[in-house]
């Protein structure tokens, strides 16, 4: 601003000089106006500088005030923190004083207790010495002699107790050894028989991929439950790649289950309704095959005039084993052997073959009817109008009835020859199957039971009951009664799980 004033003054001086040379009057007027302008400019500059000075002063005062407030807050916070620390120090000092006082009291108490204990110890030593002296006088024995007698008594007592403990341990070890020996033998037998059992009680169904296992199981296992309930077999899904295993002692059920599962896999639609549909189709197909096999067996032996129902029952023997031997093949073999022997003896060849073919017909239904398969077969043949000679040969082939004809004797001999072939039969498998059949027979004997299936190699029996006959509480009672009867009538390793299933279905159709 001062520079501008200087410049203006210089300009005025130059203008005045020029005006003086030119127009004195005009110069004077201009000088006058320039002075006024200069005065205004100077005044404006003074006012502006004064305002800025006041503003700077105000800003400085505000900043000083804010800093003062911040300093006061900081001082206040520091003061409160110091007060808090001071209070904590005072509390710590009080606690330390209290602890020191408590420690002093405890030291005094311990010192008093120690002195009491010391006096009591001295008193007890004195009393014990007096008692020992009295005992020595009464017993007439010194301390060392009494100690020797006491030690000998303790030694005898210890020997007796050690002998008792040793005897108990010996019995326990013997029991454990017997149990271990039985387990080892059982495991060895199972390993030796595993191949045979696998060939006769399980079927392996190949899968296109391992994702199919999840579809077979279904959501929350509904597909596999429906499948096992319908077929009565145990479906094993393990880590075997691209394969599942069907396990059941009944080969007819296993074959129906195998066909059902293969068709479901090929179709791709696996759900409970579809499972029931495929099961019915597979069941019908197996029934047709059974009929065809029976007719083929009769044709192979060269017989005629056999009741169609008898041929159908004969076809079921294709899926039946006896001591590991296929019963249908065994029956055909017996028929041929009886026919050969009848030809050598000059008796009725056709009659011998007929009796030989039908001699084990009762094994097709022996799990449905009580009694020996020879008597069951004879009753079936009698009901289906078979000749008395054939009926007699059937009922006499195991000696339940004394054989009265040469054909009956020939059937007995042919049956023994076929069964006596090396490797023809295996006793362990037959007893295993009989035990599973007995499980189902026991369960079926109770009122209200619709069907029963032995699963898990006889470790579980699944019982389906009629919902309108047995209620939920009745299911609990029924499972206990079945378990009790199994315990009374069967011998089995481990334990058997009894599962009672009560299901009520309501079906309607939208038209």
Image: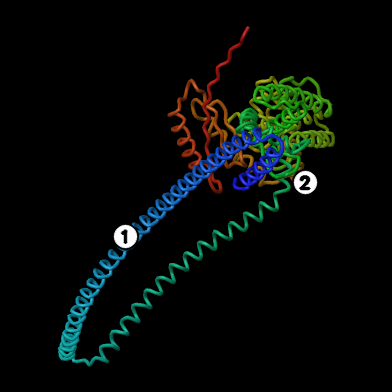
- In the rendered image, residue 473, in percent from the top left (x then y), is placed at 43, 29
Front-lying residue, 359 or 201: 201
Q: Total label count?
A: 2
Picture quarter with the C terminus: top right
Where's residue 107, x and y in %?
23, 77
Q: Which residue is drawn at 47% across and 46% down?
A: 59
**Closer to the camera: disc 2 or disc 1?**
1
Q: Can residue 16 be seen in this view?
A: yes
Judging from the image, what secondary structure is the residue with disc 2 in? loop
Q: Which residue is identified by label 1?
A: 83
Where disc 1 sits, the SS reads helix
Bin the neighbour count of mark 2 within 10 Å (Cα to Cα): few under 14, some 14-19, many 20 and up: few
Residue nearer the viewer, 332 or 415:
332
Q: In which quarter of the image is the N terminus?
A: top right
213 vs 176: above or below: above
In the rendered image, which residue does mark 2 sit on? Answer: 421
**Quarter occupied by residue 296:** top right
Residue 428 location, x and y as percent?
A: 66, 47
In the picture provided, is 22 more to the left or to the right than 506? right
Name the image quarter holding residue 459.
top right
Q: Distance between the residues labelled 2 and 1?
A: 109 Å
């Amino acid at each position: 601003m001062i520079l501008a004033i200087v410049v203006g003054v210089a300009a005025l001086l130059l203008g005045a000089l020029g005006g003086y040379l030119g127009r004195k009057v005009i110069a004077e007027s201009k000088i006058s106006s320039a002075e006024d302008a200069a005065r205004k400019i100077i005044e404006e500059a003074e006012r502006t500088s004064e305002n800025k000075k006041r503003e700077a002063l105000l800003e400085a005062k505000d900043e000083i005030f804010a800093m003062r407030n911040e300093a006061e807050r900081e001082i206040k916070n520091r003061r409160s923190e110091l007060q808090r620390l001071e209070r904590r120090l005072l509390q710590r000092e009080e606690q330390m004083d209290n602890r020191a006082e408590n420690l002093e009291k405890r030291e005094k108490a311990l010192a008093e207790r120690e002195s009491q204990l010391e006096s009591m110890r001295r008193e007890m030593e004195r009393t014990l010495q007096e008692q020992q002296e009295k005992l020595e006088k009464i017993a007439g024995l010194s301390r060392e002699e009494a100690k020797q007698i006491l030690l000998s008594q303790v030694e005898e007592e210890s020997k007796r107790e050690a002998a008792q403990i040793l005897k108990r341990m010996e019995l326990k070890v013997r029991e454990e050894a017997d149990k271990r020996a039985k387990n080892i033998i059982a495991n060895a037998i199972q390993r030796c028989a595993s191949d045979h059992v696998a060939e006769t009680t399980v079927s392996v169904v190949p899968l296109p991929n391992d994702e199919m296992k999840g579809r077979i199981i279904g959501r929350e296992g509904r597909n596999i439950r429906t499948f096992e309930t319908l077929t009565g077999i145990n479906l094993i899904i393990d880590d075997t790649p691209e394969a599942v295993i069907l396990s059941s002692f009944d080969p007819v059920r296993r074959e129906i289950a195998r066909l059902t599962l293969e068709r479901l896999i090929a179709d791709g639609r696996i759900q409970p309704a579809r499972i029931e549909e495929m099961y019915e189709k597979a069941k019908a197909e197996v029934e047709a095959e059974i009929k065809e096999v029976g007719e083929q067996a009769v044709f192979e032996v060269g017989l005629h005039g056999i009741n169609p129902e008898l041929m159908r029952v004969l076809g079921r023997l294709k899926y039946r084993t006896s001591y590991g031997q296929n019963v249908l093949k065994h029956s055909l073999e017996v028929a041929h052997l009886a026919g050969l022997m009848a030809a050598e003896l000059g008796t009725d060849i056709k009659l011998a073959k007929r009796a030989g073919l039908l001699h084990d017909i009762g094994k097709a239904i022996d799990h449905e009817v009580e009694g020996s398969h020879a008597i069951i077969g004879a009753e079936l043949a009698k009901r289906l109008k078979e000749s008395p000679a054939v009926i007699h040969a059937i009922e006499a082939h195991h000696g339940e009835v004394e054989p009265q004809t040469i054909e009956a004797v020939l059937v007995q001999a042919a049956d023994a020859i076929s069964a006596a072939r090396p490797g023809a039969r295996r006793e362990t498998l037959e007893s295993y199957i009989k035990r599973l059949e007995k499980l189902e027979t026991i369960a079926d004997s109770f009122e209200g039971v619709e069907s029963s299936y032995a699963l898990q190699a006889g470790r579980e029996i699944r019982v389906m009951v009629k919902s309108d006959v047995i209620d939920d509480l009745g299911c609990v009672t029924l499972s206990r009664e079945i378990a009790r009867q199994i315990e009374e009538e069967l011998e089995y390793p481990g334990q058997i799980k009894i599962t009672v299933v009560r299901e009520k279905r309501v079906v309607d159709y939208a038209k």
